[in-house]
Amino acid sequence: MAKDKGKGWSPGLAGLLSPVTFWLGLFFLAPLLLIVAYSFGTAGVYGGMKLGFNTNNYAQIADPLYLKILFRTLVIAVLTTLLCLVLGYPLAYFIAFRSRKWRNNLILLVMIPFWSSLIIRVYAWVVILSGNGIANHALQFLGITNGPVNLIFTPKAVLMGMVYSYLPFMVLPLYASLESFDVSLKEASQDLGANRWHTFWRVTFPLSMPGVIAGSILVFIPAAGEFVVPQLLGGAKTTMMGNLIQQQFLDARNWAFGSALSMILAVVLLVAIIFYVRRVGTDKLEVG
Amino acid sequence: MGKTRISRGRFLKMVGTAGATGSALSVLAACQTSTTPQQSGGGGGGGNTLHIYNWAQYLAPYDIKHFEKKFGMNITQDTYSSNEELLAKLQGGGTGYDVIVPSDYMVSIMAKSKVIQKLDMSKIPNFKNVSKHYRGLPFDPKNEYSVPYQAGTTGILYNKKKVGRVETWDPLWDPKFKGKMAMINDVRETIGAALMRRGYSENSTDPRKLQQAKQDLIKQKPLLQGYFDSVENVPMVRRGDIWLAHVYSGDGFLAIVQDKNLAYAIPKPGATLWVDNLCIPVGAPHVDLAHKFLNFILAPKPGAALTEYTDYSTPNQAAVPLVHGKFTKIPQWDPSGKVYDRLQTIRDIGKATRTYERIFTEVKSS
């Protein structure tokens, strides 16, 4: 986009960009290259690493056990993204069309959870959902259940915890794209005879696509790499790629396989996102 | 193991109380602070200071004070949360640490990797205080590299009222207690429990035995709430969410002293004895002082202060009579010789670690 505006390189621009280039190079690119190198290495039994060109680490993923975990991870990440969209869109829509004062206060409420650590918030769910927790007491008090029921340490609890954790990442970009929405377009649509339903699907929703795309990507990527929620809310019974990678690094002392798994996950995510953006339309990304 | 022993000791008391009152926030707040270094500075090898690299909350203030006074030196500590982290740091070299506290299997790995040095036993006369049960264990058969620091077992914390008396591993496979049980989320401990339940060694690499253990664990999985750290299992038992949990002894003891319905079992026919040890890294700046520290900890009073602080069992026999606290009344705190006969230590199994890892992943994904 910058190129379109015809601005070439200048010493000033290069100077301004050099800190960030240095930063990303040192803290993003170098570790990434290290992981690429490790993924072709051979891990010593006690954690050392012999570099080389060993494709064995990648071949191991063909093990049905690991393919199953990869597939499960993608399913959970997609479901998380869809649920966040379904829950987040009405919320973002509601907030975006309030008066300025209300808008700012409501969006502040959406961001409040970020003030505390994710682990603390997820652990709070453990206490709420546990056998003798608040949720079970409430259900029994209301006469809905008769004794404690199992609400936690199931794949459903994992999904719930992930939707909870990532919902703000969906709401914020949706809000940003809806907030700048020109209300006169909606009025024009209705003046021209479209009902509210039509107006939404033909005018409002398409114009909010940049927010939908950005929100989906922001939720999908971390969801696919999640490992805290499956541990805390899944009782480690719903293994995801993040857990598998963590185990290779921390328990199995197999950094080579752990690196290969990380690379495979990264490539799968990249392909999925390219496919998604192509499908939904890249040009729309530039509208917002 | 290692990582599951993240923050034992004082921290567990907080977990116990917080678990009972349902205050998750304080647990996590505690968890986060307890894994940060107590004194940062990364060793460094300064002249007048003994640098200890230790688990969090794992050295009694009494010991620090008295050692510093006696030898006119300062002690600084950095902390780690897993044996693997400790190993990686030492392999990196140049840490400047004088004393480290690896667990059993890690001692043999470190000796093989040549990152710890042989001890000069003539400088550690208090080694005579070490109980015979803690000498010459398989990970360091001649005590060339290590002296034992603190110890315990891995067994079952259970609610006597709900499950009666527990003596073997079988109750953890009993469908009667479906949804009321949890195991430790640790490859070696949990596969080890399945192996020992069948009377095998928990270090077995025999494919047939491992296959049986895997099938047993797959059968057990639907009966479990899940696989957690030992410190997470304890509050669930205390809240009554579960009745039986696979835990480290020290974690169990803290719950028992607060709730008389709870008990701890060292299951038959076999259970894990774990031992944390003091070692001196290769290249330690204060080798002589480090030996003095090892000798100091094995003296009766400092040893007693240490175990009163951690609530674990002590290999220091001379310290046992001096230890006060409710947990000393729990029979499993100071087990009899007969119990020791059936305990096993987790040993380094080299490449088979990866076989174990795959089995555990398969069980958890079943």
Image: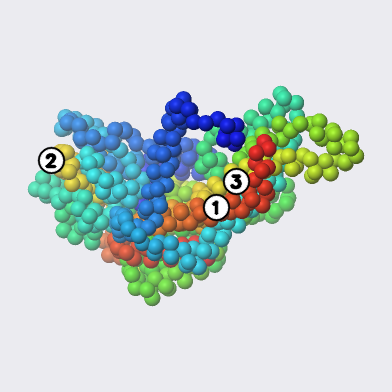
Query: Are callouts 2 and 1 both on one chain?
Result: no
Q: Is the residue under label 3 in contact with that under label 1 (CB below 8 Å)? A: no
Identify the amino acid type marked 1: Leu
Chain to which the residue tagged by mark 3 belongs = A
Give the residue drawn at x 51%, y 58%. A239
> Horizontal and vertical percent for residue B151?
30, 52
Q: Is residue B114 found left or right of B250 in the rendered image? A: left
- Return the mark for residue B12: none
- Nearer the camera: disc 2 or disc 1: 1
- Identify residue for label 2: B288
Q: Is residue B237 visible?
A: no
Look at mark 3 in the image and give the residue it sits on: A217
Tell me where residue B226 appears, x and y as whole percent: 51, 57
- A255 shown above or below A113: below
Q: Badge 1, how many Cα within 10 Å: few under 14, some, many 20+?
A: some
User: Percent x, y for residue A267?
Assistant: 51, 54
Q: Are marks 2 and 3 on the same chain?
A: no
Q: Quadrant of the C terminus of chain A?
A: top right
Instruction: Provide the residue designation for mark 1.
Output: A269
User: From the viewer's perspective, is residue A113 above or below residue B348?
Assistant: above
> The disc numbered 2 marks a residue on which chain?
B
Front-most of A269 and B241? A269
Q: Nearer the viewer, residue A208 or B349?
A: A208
Say which element carries label 1: helix
Q: Residues within 10 Å of mark 3 (few under 14, many from 20)?
A: many
Q: CA distance from mark 2 to mark 3?
A: 58 Å
Horizontal and vertical percent for residue B159? 49, 56
